[in-house]
Amino acid sequence: MGTQSQTDDHRESSRTGRSATEQNRAYYDQELAGKDDYWRKMAAPRFRVREFLRLLDVEPFFRLCDLGCGGGQLLREIAEHHPRAALCGVDLAEAQIAANRRQIPSAQFFAMDLDQPAAVPTELLGACDVIVASELIEHVGNPLQLLQNALMLTRPGGRLLLSTQSGPLRETERRVGHQRHFSVEQMRSLLVQSGWQPERVYNCGFPFHDLSKWYANRNPDASMKQFAEGKYGLREDVLCFLLRIAFRLNSHALGAQLFAVARRIGK
């Protein structure tokens, strides 16, 4: 499924001689820097964090790996709630991985492109009780390979907790690198194809998550400027606070936010 961003990456790769992976790594090194306020204040990431923590509390675990860990914000949240867990993170953005190693020295970090074959580090093969992939799969060129590599990281009986987006691919989402969105049926089929046993695949987030996406796409230029600058004044702080409260009323059965829980079965 091609997109304009993929076409632009191909043209840029041809012009500079850099691979698509190198192009993506440079993009995410730049885009992920300085986004801590976004994670702490914006309603959508806070909503996802609460849901991941709720899913993690369902059963005990020891070793967890966050795929597409970015600046390590989700890992820090998990560490606060599960201080005895052994944590690791994987991301394409090498600058972020280097920063994470300094900021979260208790965790392991690996820089790699996990939608490529044979990308899994040998020390992690079959080692993880839980794999978390928050808002990652919509960015990759080969989602099936990503899920197969995630399966290789997981011990038999281990779980995958995944979040992504459903619904139409809008302008702001294209600009932050989304290549596709998934229906519940598409995600369930992809999990089965990659060797996972889906336990629950569900939409959630209606109405406030959906409304916030609609509002952001009324003026994509302004929304992207706000995201890029990462500046939050008093007005933005108050609005974010009110939205965080509103998001607690979101449905766990309807909406454009998608979560999936799957398990590795067999050897």
Image (cartoon, helix red, strand yellow):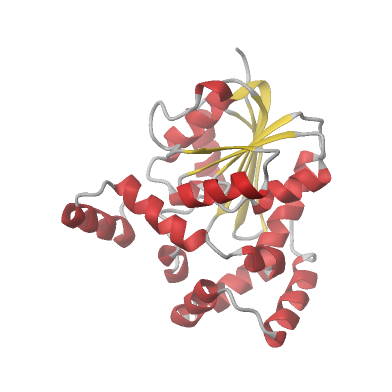
Identify the residue shown where x is 50% and y is 26%: 121
Identify the residue shown where x is 66% and y is 64%: 44
Q: Is residue 203 left or right of residue 186?
A: right
- Residue 178 appears in the picture as rendered: no
Furthest-top residue in this view: 267
Furthest-bottom residue in this view: 235
Work out whether 4 lies above or below 208.
above
Q: Nearer the viewer, residue 231 or 267?
A: 231
Estimate the x, y position of residue 60 in percent, counting from the top left: 81, 30
Work out whether 243 lies above or below 196.
below
Estimate the x, y position of residue 231 in percent, counting from the top left: 60, 78
- Residue 129 appears in the picture as rendered: yes
Estimate the x, y position of residue 250 in percent, counting from the top left: 74, 64
Q: Is residue 107 left or right of residue 228?
A: right
Q: Nearer the viewer, residue 143 or 127?
A: 127
Q: Nearer the viewer, residue 3 or 15?
A: 15
**Quadrant (top left, top right, bottom left, bottom right) of the C terminus:** top right
Identify the residue shown where x is 64% and y is 33%: 262
Work out whether 206 lies above or below 86.
below
Furthest-front residue in this view: 102
Which quadrant of the structure image shows residue 205?
bottom right
- Number of numbered discs present? 0
Identify the residue shown where x is 41% and y is 66%: 175
Work out whether 30 lies above or below 161.
below
Which quadrant of the structure image shows residue 216?
bottom right
